[in-house]
Image (cartoon, rainbow, N blue to C red):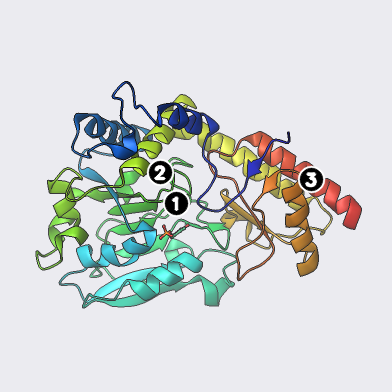
Amino acid sequence: MTTVYNFSAGPAVLPEAVLQTARQEMLDYQGTGVSVMAMSHRSDTFQSILYHAEQDLRLLLDIPANYKILFLQGGASAQFSQTAMNLAHGFARIDSVVSGNWSQIAHREMGKLVGAKVHLAADGGARYGFLDVPPPESWDISPDSAFVHFVANETVHGVQYGRMPRLADGLPPLVCDMSSEILSRRINVADFGLIYAGAQKNLGPAGATIVIIRDDLLDRCPDTVPAVWRYKAHVEKQGMYNTPATYPIYIAGLVLRWLHAQGGVDKIERLNRRKAETLYAAIDGSGGFYQNLIAAGARSKMNVVFTTGNADLDKRFAQEADLVGLRQLQGYKTLGGMRASIYNAMPLAGVEELVRFMDEFRRRNG
Ligand SMILES: *Cc1c(COP(=O)(O)O)cnc(C)c1O
């Protein structure tokens, strides 16, 4: 049997050890006689699962005590507007940085249902064709804005802030979509007002969205916003305002425990760098057969996009790779080419196998 490596952009690869544990515990979670899927979210057992998931996340990212952690639903897409509904009340302006597909969608969604106008603080499309990210020094932001929104890693375009932006004191809180990179590298949580991430890229299955919010920001949201959309309502009920996505939270908890066992974020960051360097070296060393046009400092360490420049050949690449167990390498539907998503759970061996296939494919077609 061939070993399968899954390069899907999301829902994405999960650690095999996590899936093994989930399988063992599927019908009977630790002697309770009940599956996690079928137990009350208010049971002591599930409360403990949620508590440990939160604590593990807090430890892994070194999250300060004045930040609350929530596991919400609706995906990162819900956060595009939920952030504004909660943080922009009484403000005239939101600053929004566009650096790729997801920040562009966020930019369009953010101003709906709120009075604040969304100001395009930087346009990575017009300026760089999404082949580089607008540097924070170039962002046109106002101290009076409700917040500044950006996406740390653009999953579709394969661009990432190599150095994580931070704003000077006195500027509005930074709100960041880290869906496709959370826990892939060391960050300083205190530099952000709010961080959110859909679980299905680097953290677990689809269905849970992590929100990490500085607690003073909770009071910005008026009671006229329906409770299910109000972060504070979820915080006040310890994440039990309504039924949370219990099974995705359980799996995310297993992934967090797995990450601890791997040596934590610093260790995985080193491995992620090695994986990305291996893959980009193969692209750059292919004598032009494979290309990645992204500026060196903005090349994503999570989503590596590349192309042969020939749509038919690209298609054949993904098809033939699939036959040897290298799955889901086709590029995003509107961009074409190839995309290898190499999240935390992708082992170095998977990247090395991909590089071997790339060399062999080039020899046959170059
Ligand atoms: C996948 C993704 C999203 C969308 O997530 P949904 O869970 O489908 O809403 C948003 N932002 C980024 C950076 C993503 O990678």
Three-letter amino acid code at disc 1?
Met
Q: Is residue 216 visible to us here?
A: no
Q: Position of residue 13 (x, y in %)?
A: 55, 43
Image quarter (top left, top right, bottom left or bottom right) of the C terminus: bottom right
Q: Secondary structure at mark 3?
A: helix
- The residue closer to the viewer here, 5 or 344, is 5
Say which residue label 2 marks. 187
The residue sitting at 43% across, 62% down in the picture is 136
**Is there CB contact under 8 Å for labels 1 and 2?**
yes
Q: Give the answer, above or below, for where 318 lies relative to 143.
A: above
Q: CA distance from mark 3 to mark 1?
A: 33 Å
Picture quarter containing residue 115? bottom left
**Is there CB contact under 8 Å for labels 2 and 3?**
no
Say which residue label 1 marks. 164
Quarter holding ligand 1:
bottom left
- The residue closer to the viewer here, 252 or 99, is 252
**Which of the two discs, 2 and 3, labels the residue nearer the N terminus?**
2
Q: CA distance from mark 2 to mark 3?
A: 34 Å
Q: Nearer the viewer, mark 2 or mark 3?
A: 3
Q: Give the answer, above or below, for where 131 lies relative to 168.
A: below
- The residue closer to the viewer here, 339 or 277, is 339
Q: Secondary structure at mark 1?
A: loop
